[in-house]
């Protein structure tokens, strides 16, 4: 995913040695991050930035995390994952009853937190991606989203399923851009919790069988190992 498209996560924790390394870790995983040392900074960030998820420490001086959690839920803010050092579960239960989406207990494994972030984000509906309704050309093909079809320069056409046409439109919206499986999943499935990364691989394989001369050696939708997929063709209005 490009930097501008990556979900933005707000980390609220008064412990600098937690929020800064965690921010660096999440950026390496492809997310954008904002850091706040207290509830006041968090509120200002929420007013200024589009935040997809808040990682919120419960134990903070001044306004604590539970108070900010309550405010976020009342104002229909982004989903919340609580961080807590409390082992008895009381704060976790209170936070979940308030409307937090999940929690992890300190000290935590960053990979576990990452898995929980991905799970929460997939459960949260996001506005459907806008796919252009106009016909567009790439390589020797023209995509007609209204007809859900592709027409080749030699005159033959192939029908697409709704999902295939939507996926094709996403690639055409982002030419020459590496799109991760997670990003494609978000854009095509709308964070449907039943969808999974392998579904993207299957959908790309079906598209390749329809548009590539040799699906085993694709030149239009190419694989970026460790990154995702990229449309390797110029896109122009048809």
Image (tube, helix red, strand yellow):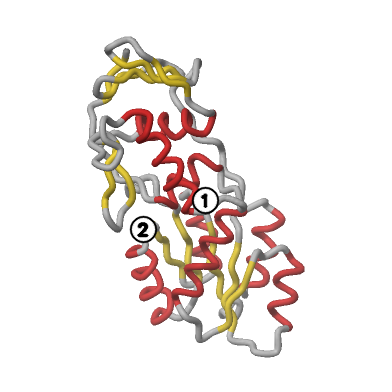
> In the image, is residue 20 above or below residue 119?
below
Q: Of residues 135 and 149, which is closer to you in this image?
A: 149
Task: Tell me the tag on residue 204.
Answer: none
* Residue 192 place in picture, x, y as percent: 60, 48
| Position of residue 122 in the picture relative to residue 31 (left or right) | right
| Position of residue 95 in the picture relative to residue 42 (left or right) | right
> In the image, is residue 135 above or below residue 173?
above
The residue sitting at the bottom extreme is 87
* Residue 5 place in picture, x, y as percent: 39, 45
Which residue corresponds to mark 2?
30
Is there a contact, CB below 8 Å, between mark 2 and mark 1?
no
Can you tell which quarter of the image residue 97 is in? bottom right
Task: Tell me the tag on residue 47.
Answer: 1
Residue lying at 67% horizontally and 51% vertically, measured from the top left = 76
The span from disc 2 to disc 1 (Cα, nearest Å) is 23 Å
Q: What SS does tag 1 mark?
A: helix
* Residue 82 place in picture, x, y as percent: 60, 72
**Label 2 CA crowd tier, 10 Å (few <14, some 14–19, many 20+):** some
Residue lying at 50% horizontally and 82% vertically, measured from the top left = 108
Q: What SS does tag 2 mark?
A: loop
| Position of residue 160 in the picture relative to residue 29 (left or right) | right
């Amino acid at each position: 995913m490009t930097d501008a498209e990556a979900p933005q996560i707000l980390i609220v924790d008064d412990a600098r040695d937690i929020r800064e390394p965690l921010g660096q870790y999440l950026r390496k995983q492809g997310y954008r991050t904002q850091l706040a040392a207290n509830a006041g900074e968090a509120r200002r960030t929420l007013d200024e930035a589009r935040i997809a998820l808040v990682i919120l420490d419960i134990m903070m001086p001044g306004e604590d995390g539970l108070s900010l959690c309550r405010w976020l839920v009342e104002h229909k803010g982004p989903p919340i994952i609580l961080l807590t050092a409390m082992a008895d579960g009381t704060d976790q239960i209170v936070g979940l009853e308030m409307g937090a989406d999940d929690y992890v207990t300190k000290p935590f494994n960053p990979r576990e937190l990452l898995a929980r972030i991905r799970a929460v984000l997939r459960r949260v509906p996001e506005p459907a991606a806008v796919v252009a309704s106009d016909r567009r050309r790439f390589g020797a093909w023209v995509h007609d989203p209204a007809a859900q079809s592709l027409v080749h320069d030699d005159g033959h056409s192939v029908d697409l399923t709704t999902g295939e046409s939507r996926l094709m439109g996403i690639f055409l919206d982002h030419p020459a851009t590496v799109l991760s499986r997670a990003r494609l999943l978000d854009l095509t499935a709308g964070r449907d919790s039943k969808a999974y990364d392998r579904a993207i691989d299957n959908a790309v394989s079906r598209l390749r069988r329809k548009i590539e001369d040799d699906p085993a050696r694709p030149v239009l939708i190419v694989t970026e190992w460790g990154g995702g997929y990229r449309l390797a063709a110029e896109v122009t209005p048809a």
